[in-house]
Image (tube, grey):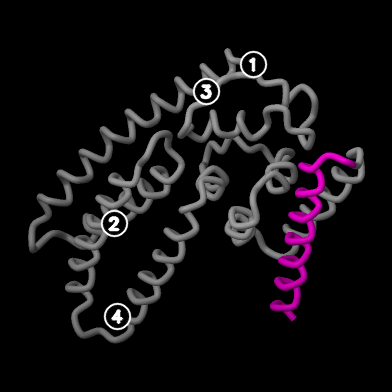
Amino acid sequence: MPRFSDRPGARERHLQRKCDNPLFPPAARAVSQDQVTLARQEDVGELQAFQAELREAVEQAVNLRPTEESEVILRLKERLDRLYEQAAGLREDQAQARQALRQLVAVVMRAVWKGAGDDARAQAELEEEEQARAAHYALLEQPLVADLLRPDSPITAGELAPTLLSADAEALAAALTLFDADQIEALCGQARLLLQEQPAGDPRIDQAWLRLRQMESAAAGGAAATH
């Protein structure tokens, strides 16, 4: 059995997810220490690049002028949101980095609110944006969500069903918000076929059946909401 980090990054975490997991194909679940070491090195490299970009973003934020152009402020806000999303899936404990990013976003948003002035429509849009950001940040408390949202996600389309079935109930609930009802229904079909191939008696498979029922409930709820 390979040795994994206590707080792995996205690549190593997905190998850990697949390792000796009967829901994945035999070749995928036969994870070697060399694979883990390579994934860890890539995760470390990503963390170092993130830290460098975070320092740049902090410097840009603290040097914002009171009369800064709105386009510059909006680009910085988008950059900070992207960095926060990335931080949620990085290796090691990134609580301090995420807290710093939340504070920077708050600073930038004060400038955005100031630019909105007394425009009621602009204020309403900003309020909606703040609420959406808070909800998104809450979802990112689950590393699975961060892994799924990555442009270079290690979770392939063919691995979605076993990945979701392997999650705990809280992580699955958060992850399912990323999909619409039709997508969840399709994933349920894939998951059911996968589980029907598994022998009975494995506690991990029993848990996976519970996750499937959770997915089916989410699909039914989403379908009802669209009618």
State the CA–CA distance, disc 2 to disc 1: 38 Å
Q: Where is residue 150 in the image (x, y as percent from the top left)?
A: 51, 42
The residue pinned by badge 1 equals 32
State the CA–CA distance, disc 2 to disc 3: 28 Å
* Mark 1 surroundings within 10 Å by alpha-carbon count, few (fewer than 14), some (14 through 19), many (20 or more): few
Amino acid bearing label 3: Ala
- Relative to 113, say whether 17 is above or below: above
* Residue numbers of the magenta segment: 201-227
Q: Position of residue 201 (x, y in %)?
A: 88, 41
State the CA–CA distance, disc 4 to disc 1: 53 Å
| Residue toward you, 27 or 5 | 5
Instruction: Tell which circle, 2 or 4, labels the residue nearer the N-terminal end.
Output: 2
Q: What element carries label 3?
A: helix
- Quarter the N terminus occupies: top right
| Residue toward you, 111 or 167 | 167
Instruction: Tell which circle, 2 or 1, labels the residue nearer the N-terminal end.
Output: 1
The residue drawn where x is 58% and y is 58% is 174
The residue drawn where x is 73% and y is 33% is 21
Q: Nearer the viewer, mark 4 or mark 1?
A: 1
* Mark 3 surroundings within 10 Å by alpha-carbon count, few (fewer than 14), some (14 through 19), many (20 or more): many
Amino acid bearing label 2: Arg
Give the label on residue 39, or none: 3
